[in-house]
């Protein structure tokens, strides 16, 4: 299926879902739920919260049935809802204790599979970026969206998104280098780009 056909199909499905068609909603859910969950996980670093955010996105879509609207870019619409929900949760975290201040045995387990020490450093570095920078890198690196697609979703110019992404990658590299140096983990330029 060509990209514009997929876009048109998604637009039609969302229109139908907002009009009350549960089958159209189910098809959109199948297309986007994994990506929404991954996005939320990379933004929040918590599986349970990521699942909650994805569920909340679909709840919001259902709530929109009361006041249907025309949406021209479905991915942008869904990820904007997810973005607001993630940022709300990140703001709420500021009022609670930082994980770094908790004893290590009280830290939540983010993933069940083992990561290398360097991968842990990259994940920690990603968490230290601003939410906006983290979001941009997550959408591009983990979800595979191109900068032009992200620009459409965020109603920004591709040049502005590319510039912001370039600065975010530079910040990430700087944080990774600093953390790796502090931990005594040797890194090379290739190592950083492989683990982004």
Image (cartoon, rainbow, N blue to C red):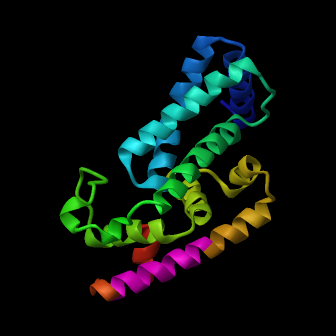
In terms of depth relative to the viewer, which is nearer, 85 or 5? 85
Residue 49: tell me if it is visible: yes
Question: In the rendered picture of this protein, how many numbered marks are placed on residues?
Answer: 0
Q: Position of residue 19 (x, y in %)?
A: 72, 14
Question: Is residue 187 in view from this perspective?
Answer: no
Q: Residue at x 76, y 49 (%)?
A: 152
Quarter of the rendering occupied by the N terminus: top right
Dominant secondary structure (helix, strand or loop) of the stretch shown in magenta: helix
Q: Position of residue 84 (x, y in %)?
A: 62, 47
From the viewer's perspective, tell me whether residue 182 is left or right of residue 12: left
Q: Which residues are magenta?
A: 168-181
Percent x, y of residue 31: 55, 30
Which residue is drawn at the image coordinates 55% and 62% (left, top)?
134
In the rendered image, residue 146 lying in the magenta stretch gets the answer no
* Image position, residue 110 (x, y; %): 31, 54
What residue sits 46% from the left and 45% below the top? 38
């Amino acid at each position: 299926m060509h990209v514009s056909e997929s876009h048109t199909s998604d637009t039609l499905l969302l229109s139908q879902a907002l009009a009350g068609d549960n089958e159209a909603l189910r098809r959109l859910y199948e297309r986007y739920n994994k990506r929404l969950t991954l996005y939320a996980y990379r933004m929040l670093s918590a599986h349970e919260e990521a699942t909650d955010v994805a569920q909340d996105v679909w709840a919001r879509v259902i709530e929109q049935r009361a006041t249907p609207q025309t949406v021209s870019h479905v991915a942008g619409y869904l990820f904007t809802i997810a973005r607001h929900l993630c940022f709300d949760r990140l703001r709420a975290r500021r009022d609670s204790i930082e994980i770094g201040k908790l004893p290590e045995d009280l830290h939540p387990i983010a993933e069940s599979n083992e990561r290398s020490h360097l991968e842990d450093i990259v994940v920690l570095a990603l968490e230290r970026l601003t939410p906006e920078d983290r979001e941009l890198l997550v959408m591009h690196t983990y979800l595979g969206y191109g900068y032009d697609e992200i620009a459409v979703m965020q109603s920004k110019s591709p040049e502005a998104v590319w510039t912001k992404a370039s600065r975010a990658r530079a910040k990430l590299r700087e944080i990774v280098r600093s953390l790796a140096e502090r931990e005594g983990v040797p890194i090379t330029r290739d190592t950083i780009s492989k683990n982004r």
